[in-house]
Amino acid sequence: MSDHAVVYAPSAEFIAQANVKGMEGYRELYAAADADPEKFWSEFAASSVDWAEPWTQVLDWSNPPFAKWFVGAKLNVAHNCLDRHLSTSRKDKIAILFEGEPGDSRAITYAELHKLVSRFANVLKGRGLKQGDRAIIYMPMIPEAAVAMLACARLGIIHSVVFGGFSAEALKTRIQDLGAQLVITADGGWRRAKEVKLKPAVDEAVLDCPTIQNVIVYQRTNSGAAMTEGRDHWWHELEAGVSDDCPAEPFDSETPLYVLYTSGTTGKPKGILHTSGGYLTQAMASMKWVFDLKESDIYWCSADIGWVTGHSYVVYGPLASGATVLMYEGTPDTPTFARWWQVIEKYKVTIFYTSPTAIRALIRQGDQFPNAHDLSSLRLLGSVGEPINPAAWEWYYKTIGKSKCPIVDTWWQTETGTIMISPLPGAVPAKPGSGTLPLPGVQAEVVDLKGHPVERGKEGYLIIRKPWPSMLRTLWGDPERFKEAYWSKFPGIYFTGDAARQDEDGYFWVLGRVDDVMNVSGHRLSTMEIESALVRHPAVAEAAVVGKPHEITGQAVCCFVTLKKGDHDVDALGKELRQWVAHEIGAFARPEEIRFTEAMPKTRSGKIMRRLLREIVTSHTVAGDVTTLEDMNVITSLAAAQQDED
Ligand code: PRX
């Protein structure tokens, strides 16, 4: 399919105004980074980030895979996102435009955001929090989520945002793993015209979390919350009378900024650790190159703050770059499927970044919704989280972008911190479904099981050969798993877990995961995590979970379950198990299908043959062109090959 793909080159008009102009512009930048990565990154870092002290070494890779970037340098990430803009014309520029689901709105300037963050940082200081402490943020998509993150960054407190859709159980395991001292939450948020309460889940979770000393609750929905004396505090009460002067102390470049949990191949989520200087540098680089950011842009990334996209491309990248960021609290379907298009029209959004799942769900509703709104402010569109099928790409390009906005299909991961493969919109012609070429400074390759590059056109494993500034530094509390999970398959080289191929133009086509990780609506789910949840149910003897191709969500969770002996009402039990998984992990992990089976196919050594199960669920080709049968077969055989090796 890649060989005959239609090519969409950027218009002369777009190229003329682009931050990186034409293929020559891209090639020049890529070649400079390739020839001397340290020089390249040091120049970019020096010109874009505000450092309190310079580095003595750009990269320390003497103890791989533990990288240090900008060794000895000092900076404060919140200062870079806020304070430094205050001495420029950005002081009164809008930093955050907020649209709540009920239709309430706010416009917060950089000067105002600086005050909100400083005041909340003083609240945290007042509760005794200090550098190196850990705070969990469990909030709806409201500006205070960003305020909480930036206040932590200002004080060197490591934050871990837990997506509001996770259950109390999932929240608890993350608090415990991190040994967090504080939870920052809200009474609730608005979603699909209903209040989604958050505080009750926190109450349930912290029962088993003795390290938690404080819970701070922002009042969003005003529906009240049970408050435990001494432990729980209302945000607005703590803030009353607190000074908004809170100096941003410089920290070492390698100071941990956040831990973000993501699903791995075992039942236990991995705490991905990102640090400060390198992360911010590369986040800013991608804002400039991929989003072609200009002073006048109104930039909207629809990702929730609970995922890495919400970290790098709602908060840190755009704010450090002085952008106006739009945040929307709700879903695209409430009150109607025109909601997003209405928001774009209302705020004259120029750059819009969303997921293929959302695009496919919106396509299904018909063109009357976007067509009823003026989308002419848009100049650039983006996609992230999963492969985008060509039909969805074309619709996005024509119906939303009116055939004048380039689309950046951005491939990256929680671990990579920032975008690794994507067209630069004024430079690299797009082919629908391909992330095209790696960004300057990224050495991506497709290799075979021995780590040798495969020929163009052949499938293999996607790796990144050299360290990059925004790479994860380790897994929280588990350096051995960090080495094992990413650096052992191809010794010394970062393995992404994805299968890919490069076409004759060197364009990358990412096919999907080759490990036991599913991608549902662009969210990573571990088959093992769901299996562990299922076998905790008293009726379940054994469970095997595989991803099944799905027209809208890319993949859906399909569970094979064997039951313990006894009389079972399988219809009722099917429903109960779906609910059980939602309770154990979160509603977004609810299985699409539970199939009861007498026995699991197993190898002689007793391992469940997931390959067979995958073949069973993928052998009926899905409608549409979400995933072609051919591609599924490729992934399945690559996955099997690598599992036979393990
Ligand atoms: O399989 C790839 C897929 O999502 C995985 C990373 O998931 P996560 O860490 O949750 O981060 C999602 C947001 C960055 C990758 O290993 N993936 C992500 N973006 C794309 C993609 N697959 C194809 N095309 C993409 N643009």
Image: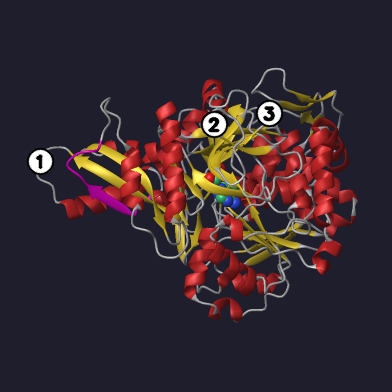
Residue kind at label 1, given as amino acid type? Gly
Left or right for 172, reference 246: left
Tell me residue 181's x, y (percent).
Answer: 55, 31
Q: Which amino acid does the dot numbered 3 rest on?
A: Gln
Left or right of 183 in this view: 289:
right
**Which element is circle 2 on?**
loop
Q: Give 248 or 393, whichever is nearer the viewer.
A: 393
**Image: 410 above or below 481:** below
Point out the tag, 2 or 3, that comes first from the N-terminus: 3
Checking the image for residue 120, the label placed there is none
Foreground pick, 566 / 112: 566
Q: Residue 346 lies in what quarter of the image? A: bottom right
- Within 10 Å of the Cα at label 3, are there few (<14), some (14-19), or many (20+) other Cα atoms? some
**Closer to the camera in the image, 484 or 146:** 484
Mark 1: few/some/many CA within 10 Å (<14, 14-19, 20+): few
Q: CA distance from mark 2 to mark 1?
A: 43 Å
Q: Nearer the viewer, residue 165 or 534?
A: 534
Q: Within 10 angstroms of label 2, few (less than 14), some, or many (20 or more) residues?
A: many
Eyeballing the image, is 327 above or below 528? Answer: below
Mark 3 to mark 1: distance in Å? Answer: 55 Å
- Whether ligand 1 has any atom under 8 Å from the Cβ at mark 2 is answered as no
Q: Which residue is mark 2?
A: 180
The residue under label 2 is which amino acid type? Ala
Bounds of the magenta segment: 590-601
Q: Which residue is mark 1?
A: 566
Q: Is residue 592 magenta?
A: yes
Q: Secondary structure at mark 3?
A: loop
**Between tags 3 and 1, which lies in front?**
1
